[in-house]
Every structure is written in structure tokens, then in C-alpha cells.
């Protein structure tokens, strides 16, 4: 079970990884075979299913966002831990606080 202290530390390190623009450190928070889906994958890569699988494919998709100007920056707002189901992260686009939201 994930406790609040572990979740806080994980979230702080995840945010710091993105703010450092360190792809290896970012990917260390994911398994090698994780999947990502987004309507922007359809738009930018022309993949009708809108899904990428594996750290190599996702890192190639994310890499251009790490070189945007002004630099991509995240701010940790809160960490929620729910003990009765698998943890999940949902962050509507309007709640993200960063520059160049559509650059990634």
C-alpha cells in the first residue's frame, strides 16, 4: 500500500525530474513498458489510436517539450492517496501550471 509520505516524496521527485529536464530521471518513475494515450498523439504523430507504448516511444514524444522556451516548469499542488483502489493521476489541462502547455 502506498502511504502519504512515500507518495509525497515520489511526487516531489517526479516534479523535480521534469523541471530539471532530465529524461532519464523522468523515465525512472515509469516501467519500461508503460503506455501513454493523448489526443495530441493523434494530432501530432498521426496515430489514430492516440497511444504510445514503451519508454523509448514516449521519450521521443516528450523530448521536444524539454527544450521549449520559456522552459517547461511544473508546480506540485497536492498529492492524494486513495487506499481502496489503484492510485491514479488525473490533471485536467486547465489545472496544469506551466508555460507552453501545448509544446509537449
Image (spheres, helix red, strand yellow):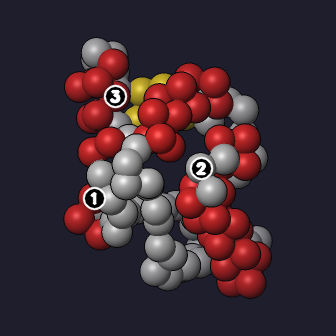
Mark 2 packing: few (<14 Cα in 10 Å), some, or many (20+)? some
Distance CA(mark 1)–CA(mark 3): 15 Å
Q: Residue furthest front?
A: 69
Rendered-image quadrant of the N terminus = bottom right
Distance CA(mark 3)–CA(mark 2): 20 Å
Q: Closer to us: mark 3 or mark 2? A: 2
Using the image, determine if residue 92 lies above or below residue 26.
Answer: below
First of labels 1, 3 by sequence position = 3
Mark 1 packing: few (<14 Cα in 10 Å), some, or many (20+)? few
Residue 92 visible in this rendered orientation of the protein: yes
Q: Which numbered marker is on residue 21?
A: 2
Distance CA(mark 1)–CA(mark 2): 20 Å
How far across and down, in percent of the image, does residue 15 sit? Answer: 58, 65
How far across and down, in percent of the image, does residue 68 sit? Answer: 40, 44
How far across and down, in percent of the image, does residue 80 sit? Answer: 53, 79
Q: Closer to us: mark 1 or mark 2? A: 2
Question: Which residue has dot 3 on it?
Answer: 41
Q: Residue at x 36, y 63 (%)?
A: 98
Using the image, determine if residue 51 lies above or below residue 72.
Answer: above
Question: Which residue has dot 1 on it?
Answer: 93
Q: Where is residue 65, by image quadrant? A: top left
Q: Where is residue 55, by image quadrant? A: top right
82 vs 54, nearest the viewer: 54
- Mark 3 and mark 1 in contact (Cβ < 8 Å)? no
Q: Residue at x 65, y 72 (%)?
A: 12
10 vs 20, nearest the viewer: 20
Amino acid at each position: 500500500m502506498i502511504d502519504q509520505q512515500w507518495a509525497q516524496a515520489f511526487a516531489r521527485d517526479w516534479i523535480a525530474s521534469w523541471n530539471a529536464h532530465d529524461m532519464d530521471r523522468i523515465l525512472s518513475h515509469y516501467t519500461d513498458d508503460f503506455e501513454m494515450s493523448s489526443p495530441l498523439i493523434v494530432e501530432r504523430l498521426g496515430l489514430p489510436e492516440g497511444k504510445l507504448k514503451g519508454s523509448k516511444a514516449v521519450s521521443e514524444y516528450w523530448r521536444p517539450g524539454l527544450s521549449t522556451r520559456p522552459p517547461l516548469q511544473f508546480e506540485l499542488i497536492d498529492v492524494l492517496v486513495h487506499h481502496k483502489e489503484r492510485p491514479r493521476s488525473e490533471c485536467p489541462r486547465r489545472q496544469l501550471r506551466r508555460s507552453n502547455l501545448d509544446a509537449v
